[in-house]
Image: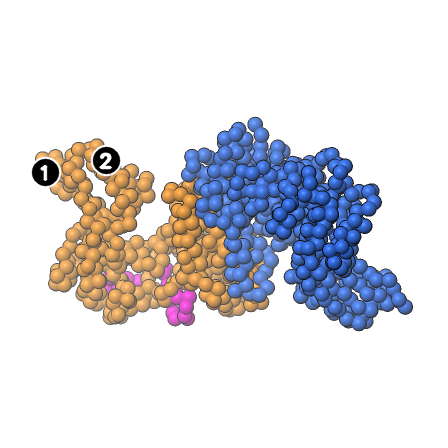
Chain colours: A orange, B blue
Amino acid sequence: MALIVQKYGGSSAGDAGRIKNIARRAIATKEKGNRVVVVISAMGDTTDELVSLAHQITSQPDEREMDFLLSTGEIVSSTLLAMAVKALGHKAISLSGSQAGIQTDNTHSAARIRAIDPRRITRELDKDNVVVVAGFQGVTEDLDITTLGRGGSDTTAVALAVSLGADMCHIYTDVDGVYTADPRLVPEARKLKEIDYEEMVELATYGFKVMHPRAVEIGQIYSMPIYVASSFNDNAGTVIRGGIPMEVRNKVRGIAHDSNVAKITVLGAADRPGIASAIFEPLAKANVSVDTIVQNASVDGITDLTFTVARDDVPKALKVVEPIAESIAAKGCVVDSDLGKVSIVGTGMQNTPGYAARMFTALSDAGINIELITTSEIRITCIVNRGKVVDAVRALHKAFELDQE
Amino acid sequence: MALIVQKYGGSSAGDAGRIKNIARRAIATKEKGNRVVVVISAMGDTTDELVSLAHQITSQPDEREMDFLLSTGEIVSSTLLAMAVKALGHKAISLSGSQAGIQTDNTHSAARIRAIDPRRITRELDKDNVVVVAGFQGVTEDLDITTLGRGGSDTTAVALAVSLGADMCHIYTDVDGVYTADPRLVPEARKLKEIDYEEMVELATYGFKVMHPRAVEIGQIYSMPIYVASSFNDNAGTVIRGGIPMEVRNKVRGIAHDSNVAKITVLGAADRPGIASAIFEPLAKANVSVDTIVQNASVDGITDLTFTVARDDVPKALKVVEPIAESIAAKGCVVDSDLGKVSIVGTGMQNTPGYAARMFTALSDAGINIELITTSEIRITCIVNRGKVVDAVRALHKAFELDQE
């Protein structure tokens, strides 16, 4: 008897009808002879509505209280799903993250799972229940409620699957798998039957919305296979797993993009040790995620320091960086908020030369200027003008022949 | 340093503005040198909205899941209140019923408090926090969430006050105290400065909406003084306490009424032992609260059995009673849904004759027919036609000179 952990996101749980649909899918999985744990997100816009309620009280809500507030969204959807399964004649029980044994550190709004005590879930599975677990949340040692931040419900699902020794983790969402590029932009994009963890982490980090990289990484560490598919149909999805043989013919697996990029340049900073950490440590503390960092060659001991952040984080980033720029006698900060990035990803690229050149040529041929470049072992990312992102994705998809099997 | 437990109902917490108002009131109480615990209900219509969501899933939601679902309403208002207190520069923390140590039996939707472990609350008070506790909820031994049913938040507040050894329990609502009758019906009604527990239990049971009798009873058992006042102004309210000297001049304290009464008569039942329990035990199990019961004199071993229930409970009651009536060969059931009741209440009535006669005369003089009569040691209730309830309240208020000090 296999054990399956399924996760359904907020759009899959948008209203009562969709929650009933999830119930039917969970039951179908159970009737095939599986034990089933379902992790569910808050319904549709619930989380946004709760945030807006908090902002009606104060512009800076306390984080501990905010987490406790937001955790109710997943309790609501969990209890409704358990009711729906029971109404269809099957046994079910809903559990909060706390009841499900999901123990976290006390970093409110971005807690990390420390350990999972799966005994309650196992006990409920033994009673033949479909066990519904509220995603996105956990509990500290002091029994305070935390939320896991971005990708929280995906993380709950994969971590639970690992802790329960599940056979597979299913991530159901509103797209039916992992494509070579966003099919809304590239009609020729192909759905991948399977993809390696590492590639998925890079694609997810650089713009594939299908799943959060943090959850994929947990799957990778513990070799938990993850199946990504749509909750709205029965089309075959994509399996994320390890040990996929490298392809010979085409070593790029997918083109990721992100149209939400801003570049901040600190002009004329003194080029001495400690400047970078003076800027990037406070940014990290302020929870601003910095992506690319470029430091220009120093001229007369003076340098320009450029980095990119998500466009929404610009005000927060400037609040941190501007006083620092002043304190280190820099000439000021310049912002370009109108950028995007395109990335090619594939494990086959490792130690194989020529990919970067092929990428730059394709972009150049399409008349696209490259602002900044950043790479990992299996990824090359170019920062380009936002208006050119779609063209760039199409050009690269073609150049790397991703439309062909 | 006194310890005060304050409770605010759903209308007092109707929106963000009102929650901020509660925060200011709690802080004002704290600034007078008190330690403050606030029990809060769900915002306005939240509970109804959650119930309706559950009914979109299934017409008969599972009770365990329903309790867990409904408990989120009070978590939302609690966290918002704690944020509001903190935004005003004071320390605050919100706790669920479970975190606050409120342990109940596992009668879902109508759980009884078994014990309270106040250690967490005490710890948070010691840290100088205003401690906000989600009303209406508790937790079973198995760590499942329960709700306390009607009057739940009042019950949470008084029980917490008792368990913490508080100096007083404040119940804030949308009326500013206990009146001799509903002031919307009787403009001359006087607000009482104080009232005895026993009288308040009877008045609350027979129609005064200001507070739930269950909570008053807990106050009575443990001699916890309860102060009832409005959350919308600073008018002096009413203290509910024990040991109030009996008044000599006027021994009726208040006129309660309830326009939501139905009478069910089981016609021609065999008058033998066991018939009453055959009817009333299943009704209790179906959670139908039966008030007055009258059995007519038996003629030839055949009797009519009449009882009253809340009008809304008629369908549920008939579903239970009709099959039983058939099984005991009764002639059938008759329903009159158009009734109300008026009650006079006062401890001074004990062992003093003449009150019943004075009541019946006053009603008769006002042309009001009495359908049924029921009494306790400190109360006389008459069931009358619903259309006559307001006239009856006014006539009795005048007859017992309640407009005079």
Q: Residues within 10 Å of mark 2 (few under 14, many from 20)?
A: some
Residue B286: name its quadrant.
bottom right
The relative height of residue B86 versus residue B272 in the rendered view (above or below) is above
User: Of A185 and B343, which appears nearest the observer?
Assistant: B343
Name the image quarter holding the N terminus of chain B. top right
Q: Secondary structure at mark 1?
A: loop
Residue under label 2: A324
Q: In the image, are marks 1 and 2 on the same chain?
A: yes
Give how far across and how far down residue B380 sits, in percent: 76, 50
Residue at the right extreme of this rendering: B300
Residue under label 1: A299
Residue occupying image coordinates x 22% and y 55%: A340
Residue occupying image coordinates x 51% and y 58%: B49
Give how far across and how far down residue B230 sits, in percent: 56, 42
Is residue A168 visible in the rendered image? The answer is: no
Could you say which disc has been placed on residue A155 in the image? none
Is residue A70 visible in the rendered image? The answer is: yes
Residue at the left extreme of this rendering: A300
Residue occupying image coordinates x 68% and y 55%: B391
Q: Amino acid at mark 1?
A: Val
Q: Chain of mark 1?
A: A
Give the mark nearer the N terminus: 1 vs 2: 1
Q: Amino acid at mark 2?
A: Ile
Taking the magenta stretch, the answer to whether it contains residue B65 is: no
Q: Secondary structure at mark 2?
A: helix
Q: Residues within 10 Å of mark 1 (few under 14, many from 20)?
A: few
**What is the magenta segment's predominant secondary structure?**
loop
User: Of B162 and B21, which appears nearest the observer?
Assistant: B21
Taking the magenta stretch, the answer to whether it contains residue A250 is: yes
User: Of B239 and A153, which appears nearest the observer?
Assistant: B239
Query: Range of the magenta residues?
Result: A229-252
